[in-house]
Image: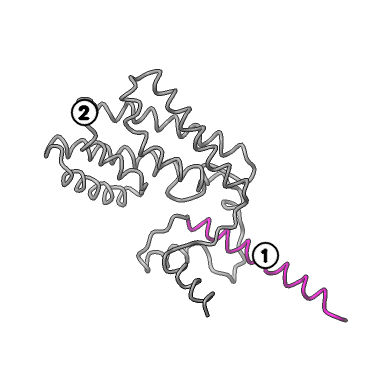
Amino acid sequence: MFLSFCRNIAQFIGIEINKTSHFERLLSGMTACLALVSVYYLSSSFLSLPDSLLVVASIGASAVLMFAIPHGALSQPWPFITGHLVSALIGIGFYQLFGASFVTGAAAVGVSIIGMHYLRCLHPPGGSTALSCVIGGSSIHAMGFEFLLYPLLINLLAMLVFAFIINNGFQWRRYPSFLSASVRNESNEKHLFEVEDLYDVLEKEDVFIDVSAEELMHIYNAARENAKDRHKSLVSKLPK
């Protein structure tokens, strides 16, 4: 009774079952730290110290996605680059039109989310970028739209390069997720549902999840093969 209650509470508050290895968990943190330090030193060679630190918070949030969830839909290059740039563009525009206030910043975040949805580049740290462009202080305000090119774009491109190099240095990681041959080239039995069926369900349910339909199909097929192997193993142990 008590264990069932605890399980229900865990599901209610969203505690996921995480069976990743200890090595993978440590690797996520270490690679994110390495990438952020590298990006900082790269941008600081072009920019002054205050400007180099302007986007550390939002890009630090991106590092969680790109190095802890490199196969996630929100972690891919298009959402990462475009999500930040669009949000910064909206944030700068709102500041120049309405000035710096928290209400303006909140409105910029809201419009950024709508823009990212329509451009298919939803990236949660983009909201932080939009907010920082409104209430980030005099140094970022003085840069105006130049902020889009530096330090923002320099930092984004550097982070993208590091994500590509570091993630692909490990066999079980592929970044972008398109490079995962098991997802791209997987053949599915004709009597089973196809990847288009997953897209249809997501559209009908009107939800967005941080995994591509192709990745879901791969997980389903891998789990199905695992179930087949388990079933064969059980059958082989039955007395003849």
Where residue 51 sits in the image (x, y, percent)?
31, 25
Q: What's the colour scheme?
A: one colour
Q: Position of residue 125 (x, y in %)?
A: 35, 44
Q: Residue at x 54, y 68 (%)?
A: 193
Instruction: Pinpoint residue 40: horizontal percent, then vertical percent.
Output: 42, 27
Q: Please state if 103 lies on the left or on the right of 223 as rendered.
A: left
Q: Which residue is mark 1?
A: 225
Counting other residues with Cα less than 10 Å from the Cα at mark 1, is it few (<14), some (14-19), or many (20 or more)? few
Specify the amino acid type for callout 2. Answer: Gly
Q: Is residue 229 above or below residue 131?
A: below
Label 2: few (<14), some or many (≥20) within 10 Å?
Answer: some
Q: Amino acid at mark 1?
A: Glu
Residue at left offset 21%, top offset 35%: 92
State the residue position of label 2: 144
Instruction: Kindly give the residue lying farthest to the left in the view shown.
Output: 98
- Of badges 1 and 2, the one in the foreground is 2
Q: Write down the region rendered in magenta.
A: 212-239
